[in-house]
């Protein structure tokens, strides 16, 4: 795969549901290796964008038949094949796995089959099991292997889901509000893990409405508002008081500490 092929390319994507426009004529391109934060208020289209990339939602088709969405240069993927390149971690995914009552280790192993559980037709070999254990260890969750995922704390569950994504050594991770529900200490440890993954070469696509979750390794920001592209560009330019105030519709103060940004209402 050509390194110059965009990780993600959207061409005039529009998504309708129940006569409501969730994403409106959205065009966007994110390069491989370009750690990116997708930022916007509630209702801006962030979660819809995630579902588009995951193939949980589908955009309106162009009249000329041209692709609306390409991931790594292709518009058609099997879910299992795509997951080997792009791992996904989201709160929706955590809730779905909680209902399975699988162990954390089996949850990670299910990533090899792009399934929610391990079925009788899923043949797990020693290599898979070794890679799953290694992925859990990499996110400091090896001790959780035999725990029912429904008993895990929010932070523990997020680590298990990242391990599930990492068994394929994906080129990129798509993280949808990954710090939701985490206490401050757990959130910082989680962000430290994301920083480590970024430094090791995994491209981060972080979807959030919290500026303080944008780790220093992320240098590109995409702003969404009301289902449209509001702005995009270098982090230093976009995380300004003026642009954040206009994005969120409220006067905001911005500060910076050790590579992290913080924003608060005036």
Image (cartoon, rainbow, N blue to C red):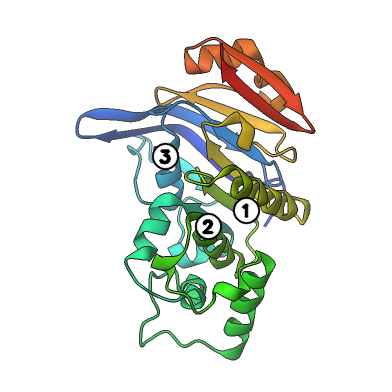
Asked if residue 166 shows in the view, the reply is yes
Residue 183 image label: none
Residue 15 spot, x, y in % from top left: 33, 35
Residue 140 spot, x, y in % from top left: 66, 66
- Horizontal relation, residue 159 to residue 49: left or right: right
Instruction: Characterize the local packing of mark 2: few (<14), some (14-19) or many (20 or more) Cα atoms within 10 angstroms.
Output: many
Q: Which residue is mark 3?
A: 47
Residue drawn at x 58%, y 83% as measured from the top left: 129
Residue drawn at x 40%, y 80% as measured from the top left: 118
Secondary element type, mark 2:
helix
Q: Nearer the viewer, mark 1 or mark 3?
A: 3
Which residue is nearer to you in this view: 47 or 11?
Answer: 47
Which residue is nearer to you in this view: 255 or 249?
Answer: 255
Calculate the distance from the C-alpha at mark 1 to the C-alpha at mark 2.
16 Å
Calculate the distance from the C-alpha at mark 1 to the C-alpha at mark 3.
18 Å
Q: Which residue is mark 1?
A: 172
Which of disc 3 and disc 1 is earlier in sequence? 3
Which residue is nearer to you in this view: 30 or 186?
Answer: 186
Residue 10 spot, x, y in % from top left: 50, 37
Q: Contact (CB < 8 A) between labels 2 and 3? A: no
Residue 158 image label: 2
């Amino acid at each position: 795969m050509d390194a110059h092929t965009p990780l993600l390319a959207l061409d005039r994507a529009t998504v309708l549901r129940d006569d409501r426009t969730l994403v409106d004529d959205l065009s966007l391109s994110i390069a491989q290796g370009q750690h990116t934060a997708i930022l916007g208020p509630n209702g801006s289209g962030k979660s819809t964008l995630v579902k588009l990339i995951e193939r949980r939602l589908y955009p309106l088709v162009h009249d000329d038949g041209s692709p609306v969405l390409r991931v790594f240069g292709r518009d058609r993927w099997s879910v299992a094949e795509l997951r080997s390149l792009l791992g996904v971690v989201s709160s929706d995914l955590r809730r779905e796995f909680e209902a399975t009552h699988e162990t954390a280790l089996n949850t990670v192993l299910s990533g090899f089959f792009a399934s929610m559980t391990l079925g009788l037709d899923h043949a797990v070999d020693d290599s898979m099991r070794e890679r799953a254990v290694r992925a859990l260890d990499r996110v400091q969750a090896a001790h959780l292997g035999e725990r029912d995922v429904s008993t895990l704390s929010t932070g523990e569950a997020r680590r298990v889901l990242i391990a599930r994504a990492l068994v394929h050594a994906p080129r990129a991770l798509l993280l949808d509000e990954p710090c939701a529900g985490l206490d401050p200490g757990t959130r910082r440890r989680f962000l430290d893990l994301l920083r480590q993954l970024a430094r090791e070469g995994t491209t981060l696509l972080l979807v959030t409405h919290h500026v303080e979750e944008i780790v220093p390794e992320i240098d590109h920001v995409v702003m969404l508002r009301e289902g449209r592209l509001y702005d995009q560009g270098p982090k230093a330019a976009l995380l300004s008081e003026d642009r954040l105030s206009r994005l969120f519709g409220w006067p905001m103060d911005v500060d910076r500490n050790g590579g992290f940004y913080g924003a608060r209402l005036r």
